[in-house]
Amino acid sequence: LVMNVNEIKTLYNRIHKVAAEVIEYEGFHVTYEVGTMIELPRAALVADQIADFATFFSFGTNDLTQTTMGLSRDDAGKFLTQYIVDGILEKDPFKTLDVEGVGALIEMACEKGRNVR
């Protein structure tokens, strides 16, 4: 997972350097792509910048839910049922995607990434 373009750029360069060394050592070419997990709201917001270096995104919805909603999955089980009973949440966001929040971030990141690639 990454948080900004500088992080993915650093990893991208490192991956290509190591891949080139392995390809030279092994004596045959391997086709590969560099992608990243989008698990932080900030990464979703700057997905267009990240897409300059990542050819694909994978979304970690549990981590993205935790960081977007400020909930710890480990601790939320103690109060989520009551939140649902009280109408604070309609469903457990770790079982059903929060479409308005987390889903909107995923949709935005996809659109931004596709505009670049």
Image (cartoon, grey):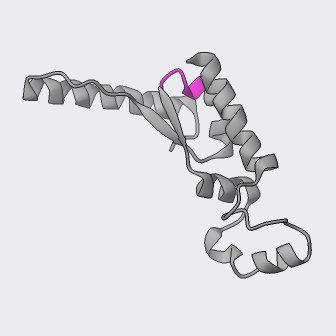
- Residue 50 lies within the magenta run: yes
Residue 43: horizontal and vertical position, in percent? 62, 38
Picture layout, residue 44 above or below residue 9: below
Tell me where residue 112 sits by quadrant. Answer: top right
Q: Residue at x 76, y 54 (%)?
A: 98
State which region is magenta: 49-53
Residue 78: horizontal and vertical position, in percent? 72, 82
Main SS of the magenta part reads loop
Relative to residue 105, is residue 100 drawn left or right? Answer: right
Picture layout, residue 88 above or below residue 17: below
Q: Residue at x 71, y 36 (%)?
A: 107
Q: Residue at x 70, y 60 (%)?
A: 96
Relative to residue 35, is residue 105 drawn left or right? Answer: right
Residue 62: horizontal and vertical position, in percent? 61, 58
Tell me where residue 30 sits by quadrant. Answer: top left
Q: Residue at x 71, y 65 (%)?
A: 71
Residue 115 makes an appearance in the image: yes
Picture layout, residue 97 above or below residue 11: below
